[in-house]
Amino acid sequence: MRRRGLDLNTVKVPIFDTATAAPVPLGYDSEHSGHLVQFYTNDNFLIDSMSRRVEIALGEGGAAIVIVTEDHRAQLARCLESRGISVDSAVHQGRYVALGADETLPKIMRDRRPDADVVRALVANLMAQAASAGVQPARVFVFGEMVALLWMQGNAQAAIEIEHLWNELQNSYGFRLHCAYPLQSFDRTEHAKDLTRICQVHSAVIPSETYSALVTDQERLRNIAELQQKAQALETATGHLQAIIEQRTSALRRLSVRILGLQDAERRRIARELHDSLGQYLTGLKIDMDMLQQAPFNDSLWAQAEELLSRCLTEVRTLSYLLHPPMMDEAGLSSAVRWYLQGFGERSGIKVNFETSDDLDRLPDSIEVGLFRILQEALTNVHRHAAATETEVRILGDAEQVILEIRDNGQGMPQDVLARFAQTGASSGVGLTGIHERVRELGGWFRVTSDDKGTSLLITVPVPANQDEHKIADSSFGN
Ligand SMILES: Nc1ncnc2c1ncn2[C@@H]1O[C@H](COP(=O)(O)OP(=O)(O)OP(=O)(O)O)[C@@H](O)[C@H]1O
Ligand SMILES: [Mg+2]
């Protein structure tokens, strides 16, 4: 059955048909006998553009050899058919050869490098097939994607070696040669050098369709100006980001050094506390016990021992409360906060108002402990820096999130400290940076606002749907 189609020997296809087809990319010339590389972002564009080249080659009585991915092979065939070309009869005449790049590539590679002799033999064979169909090499159009596959597999060196081999073979046979790379695979700054190397081994470069599909010179010039502007903006943004990264990195470095220092100081303080107070009571108790062995019926010694024992218990309780408020485990964040605020108010003389949701559910340990530590840090700052007379603490929550707000009526933060914190999330001290890091670890948001009427810290933390997963022990001290 005769298929609808072009008479492959006689039809002359226009190179540039503004009425029906996408404009022919800049630099393209059907007579171009060099080695072209085309970059593309959209498969359809590539297929459209390759099918037109195949159409031209066949229409001029030549042949086309394509070594393409399986997808592209099928798409190309469909596109050629839609252009009225009978692929079957072109194949039958030996003037259209479509090889799979995925199958051909392993055949020409040895130890991740192309075997030059195998490539030469393959091309010689293909040229011989074209010759037996009556087509001279100069009228053969070759389109290959093995190099693109190698590039995408991360073997840039092998891709360049094959490009050189194609150049050598093209010089000997004189066929028209075309290859294409998806632009998306050059998406990192360090790809720039390889892109230049790839361009250098070709005699002409066709930029991707965002440029080459533009028709007039004015459109192209405008596009170049826009690209230059984008490059400039990217360079500026990269520099800016780099500066922020450096600031944050050095703030975190300072933070970890200070945290280690604080941890040491804390351990020393607890050691001193254990030694000077608990240790003294226990020593006294030991002496009492020794004496009681000699005089077991001495009532005053017994009373003294009892007094020492109860002081030991009070010391242990106080120390353990400071390290981790026990009511947090038993009664939750609100109770622990209420207890802490009472002590803070008495010690600092600052009036404290506390508001919390009546129905605040128990939260995962990580959130309760994290928010409690944040509150301690924030109130320490209020006491040390704010010169405030009043502070307000609010803990509100629902099933999805919990909000902690600490507001004071003090003198506000120095503007430069505030601006630096807003930009980098780092402050001069450990306090705010630590709060920022804690909130980040809990997946929440942290906002500081401050003026001469006071400072407000607003922390919002999402509550995980399955709370059990997030139960972790408080490990902020001494293990
Ligand atoms: N509530 C506040 N009112 C006024 N200024 C504040 C307040 N909180 C913080 N600041 C300012 O922000 C600065 C940074 O606070 P941050 O807690 O990070 O460090 P610090 O308190 O100076 O030192 P550290 O917390 O490491 O002991 C403080 O030095 C202070 O100038
Ligand atoms: Mg502080």
Image (cartoon, rainbow, N blue to C red):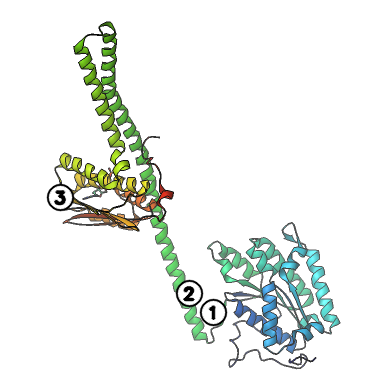
First-in-chain label (1 vs 3): 1
Instruction: Residue at 21% x, 9% y: name it.
Output: 298
Q: Which residue is mark 1?
A: 211
Badge 2 amino acid: Leu
Residue of label 3: 390
Query: In what quadrant of the picture does the C terminus appear?
Result: top left
Say left or right for 435 vs 6.
left
The image's mark for residue 225 is: none
Helix or strand or loop: what does disc 3 sit on? Answer: strand
Q: Position of residue 476 (x, y in %)?
A: 36, 40
How far is the residue under mark 2 from the one under mark 3? 56 Å
Q: Measuring 59% from the left and 75% from the top, which residue is drawn there?
A: 40
Element type at mark 1: helix
Q: Residue 8, how many percent across, how many down?
A: 76, 90
Q: Name the foreground residue: 315 vs 22.
A: 315
Q: Is residue 203 left or right of residue 426?
A: right
Q: Which residue is mark 2?
A: 227
Q: Earlier in the sequence, mark 2 or mark 3?
A: 2
Above or below, 375 relative to 422: above
Give yes or no for contact between labels 1 and 2 (Cβ–Cβ under 8 Å).
yes
- Residue 226 horizontal/vertical position (percent): 46, 76
Q: How many numbered discs, if any?
A: 3
